[in-house]
Image: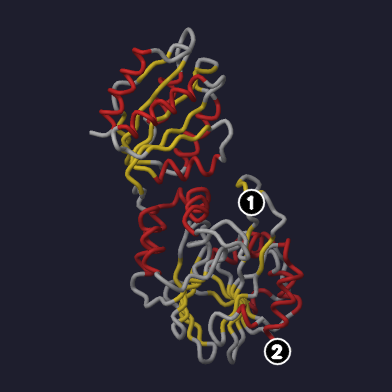
Amino acid sequence: MKENYITNSVLNIGGSDNSINLFEGQYALKNGMSYNSYLIKDKKNTVIDTIDEAITDTWFKNLEDGLNGENIDYLIVSHMEPDHAYNIGALAEKYPEMKIVGNQFTFNILCNFFNIDNIENRKILVKEGDTLDIGTHKLQFFMAPMVHWPEVMVTYDVTDKILFSADAFGKFGSLDIDEEWDDEARRYYFGIVGKFGMQTQALLAKAQTLDIKTICPLHGPILKENLSYYIDKYATWGGYKPEKEGVYIPCASIYGNSLKVAYKMKEILEQKGIEAKVDDLDRCDWAEAVANSFKYSHVIFVASSYNAGVFPPMFHLLEYLKDRNYQGRKVGIIENGSWAPSSGRTIKNILGEMKNIEIAEPMVTIKSRMNENNIEELKKLADEIIK
């Protein structure tokens, strides 16, 4: 257990599930998933969140090893989603004297999942700025509604200057996999939290008032160094701002002709000194396509026509983006159709439902296969995009 200690009195009692390959039934996992839970050893032993069903046995063993025969006085519930709250009922039964700390929304949702004996006498209701003294440690609570459920709150350990950040600053991936934080954290953020950028910014504003030395999320590694880097990333993501100057080219192609156009546009842009990235939406991970759409400063959507609309992989990407409040970008459109091209019109209509989207002209229309005239049109669109 020594390696699990964050400070002399705070330890991570969570673990990783390396067998899971799909999170929340929709997000493909390359390297499993971590589920963090924290134990603060003090005069009043305090647990912050429980764990997912998949690693229940590991969690209880880590908890008992950490307690070393002592009892639990408080359970703080940051988030009621089952990947963190699954074991609340079992823990409450095992430690009948344990108090449960949460806000009003917490207990509204908790009663949907669990029937805990004597719950009215066991709950401690907290609101914005309230504190809980557990001995040496003083804990302060800040509400973070819709990051990404309405009951979410974060806990600040005034003593050790730790922010227990719930799902904020989390990422996909197991803790025993050494990988860059950015890509899987970005994919996690825009997949799960991304709709709620305004609420994310509100949480960051609260965090800026605190002296934070460590961030302990419910998924992913504990963050101890260069915290400004991670906070800046969240400020960029929560503000719907691009991270990288360049052009992202998602393409939905039926027989491959539209994909050839996408790669030709990439070549044209790179000849002009512009970084460009193509994703084949028929085959790539949709959550990564969403993340890349937010990552780059410009996007050119390339799609085949289908059933008087647009080929479904592109339709799905656009709907995912709309659902996540995609905004503030200059984009281009390339459509393809053999007799009655319709994908461009459909893409325009969906983009028109988003906020502050500038569509570069001309829209390029391909009739089945790219020709020399089309290449000249691609060059004009490239010039307009990079103005």
* Camera-nearest residue between 282 and 114: 282
Q: Residue furthest top?
A: 339
Display colour scheme = secondary structure
Q: Residue 147: image x %, image y %? A: 48, 58
| Labels 1 and 2: the sequence-earlier one | 1
Closer to viewer: mark 1 or mark 2? 1
- Label placed on residue 70: 2
Q: Quadrant of the N terminus?
A: bottom right
CA distance for labels 1 and 2: 34 Å
- The three-letter amino acid code for the residue at tag 1 is Phe
* Camera-nearest residue between 372 and 335: 372
Image quarter for residue 221? bottom right
- The three-letter amino acid code for the residue at tag 2 is Glu
- Label placed on residue 23: 1
Q: Residue 285: image x %, image y %? A: 57, 40
Task: Please tell me which residue is depicted at 48% across the width and 81% down the height of the picture.
Answer: 139
Q: Residue 29: image x %, image y %? A: 62, 50
Q: Secondary structure at mark 2?
A: loop
* Camera-nearest residue between 153 and 179: 179
Task: Please tell me which residue is depicted at 41% across the width and 20% down the height of the picture.
Answer: 345
- Label placed on residue 226: none
Q: Residue furthest front?
A: 271
Whether residue 79 is situated above or below residue 70 in the rendered picture: above
Q: Secondary structure at mark 1?
A: strand
Q: Residue 34: image x %, image y %? A: 62, 63
